[in-house]
Amino acid sequence: MLDSSFGQAQYVTTYPMPVLQALIDETHRLGKKTGCHVFGGLGLQQTIDAGCDTVEHAYGLTKAQAEQIAAKKLFYDPTLQRYIEPYMDDNDAKSTGGKFRMIPIFEGAVRTADKTPGVRIMMGSGADGATYAHGTQALDFEMLVTRAGLSPVKALQAGTIVNAEALGWLDQAGSIDTGKFADIVAVPGDPVADITQLKHVSFVMKAGKVIVR
């Protein structure tokens, strides 16, 4: 599947390694980027081995895999909030009698990534309009800080300059600079001191035009 809005191919089906490698290589040949949605195990390892640009979810991430992501200069997009919704615990309790819980495993994976030098953590929401409502994506910033241990600065960078770099848009977005999009929001307090301030956006500028004041 090619997401033309970002010029990013996202492969959501499990492929044999030669097929996955061919898909990624061809996408790169066309000047596009790839995003692979995986959880753990062989699929995650093959995603990293094949050089997929953004590794999505990956709650089974190990220290060795995080180091490999850093060495290959890939990006890690945990979409943490989407996978720590309360129903996840309910499903785990029903399916395993409470023996296994994905939520602490996922939190541990993101903490591992954060502690691994060179891993660039993105902020992606996975908002689906059902359990995770569109428009509440500030929760992902909060969860990266409160549940995964990122500093507020690193969480803010994840959703701005790191995401822009992952998309190849550093010359257009990700920071406030001359010639960039001028897509800016303002909040009433300092999000570095209190990341939950991002839930209270009071000013929105899009392409230099004030949309909400």
Image: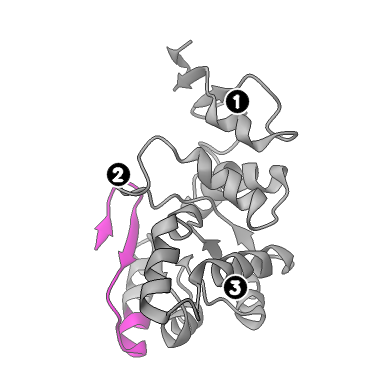
**Residue ID at (73%, 35%):** 192
Closest to the camera, between mark 3 and mark 1, is: 3
Scheme by which the image is coloured:
one colour
Closest to the camera, between mark 3 and mark 2, is: 2
Q: Earlier in the sequence, mark 1 or mark 2?
A: 2
The residue that label 3 is drawn on is 69
Q: Is residue 152 left or right of residue 9?
A: right
> Which one is in front, 125 or 185?
125
31 w.r.t. 18: above or below: above
Q: CA distance from mark 3 to mark 2?
A: 30 Å
Q: Secondary structure at mark 1?
A: loop
Q: Earlier in the sequence, mark 3 or mark 1?
A: 3
Alpha-carbon neighbours of circle 2 within 10 Å: few (<14), some, or many (≥20)? few
Q: Is residue 168 visible in this depiction of the protein?
A: yes
Q: Secondary structure at mark 2?
A: loop
- In magenta, the rendered stretch is 1-22
The residue that label 1 is drawn on is 178
82 w.r.t. 47: above or below: above
The percent coordinates of residue 188 (x first, y second) are 63, 19
Q: Say which amino acid is labelled 3.
A: Ile
The percent coordinates of residue 114 (x first, y second) are 69, 62
Q: Is residue 197 left or right of residue 137?
A: right
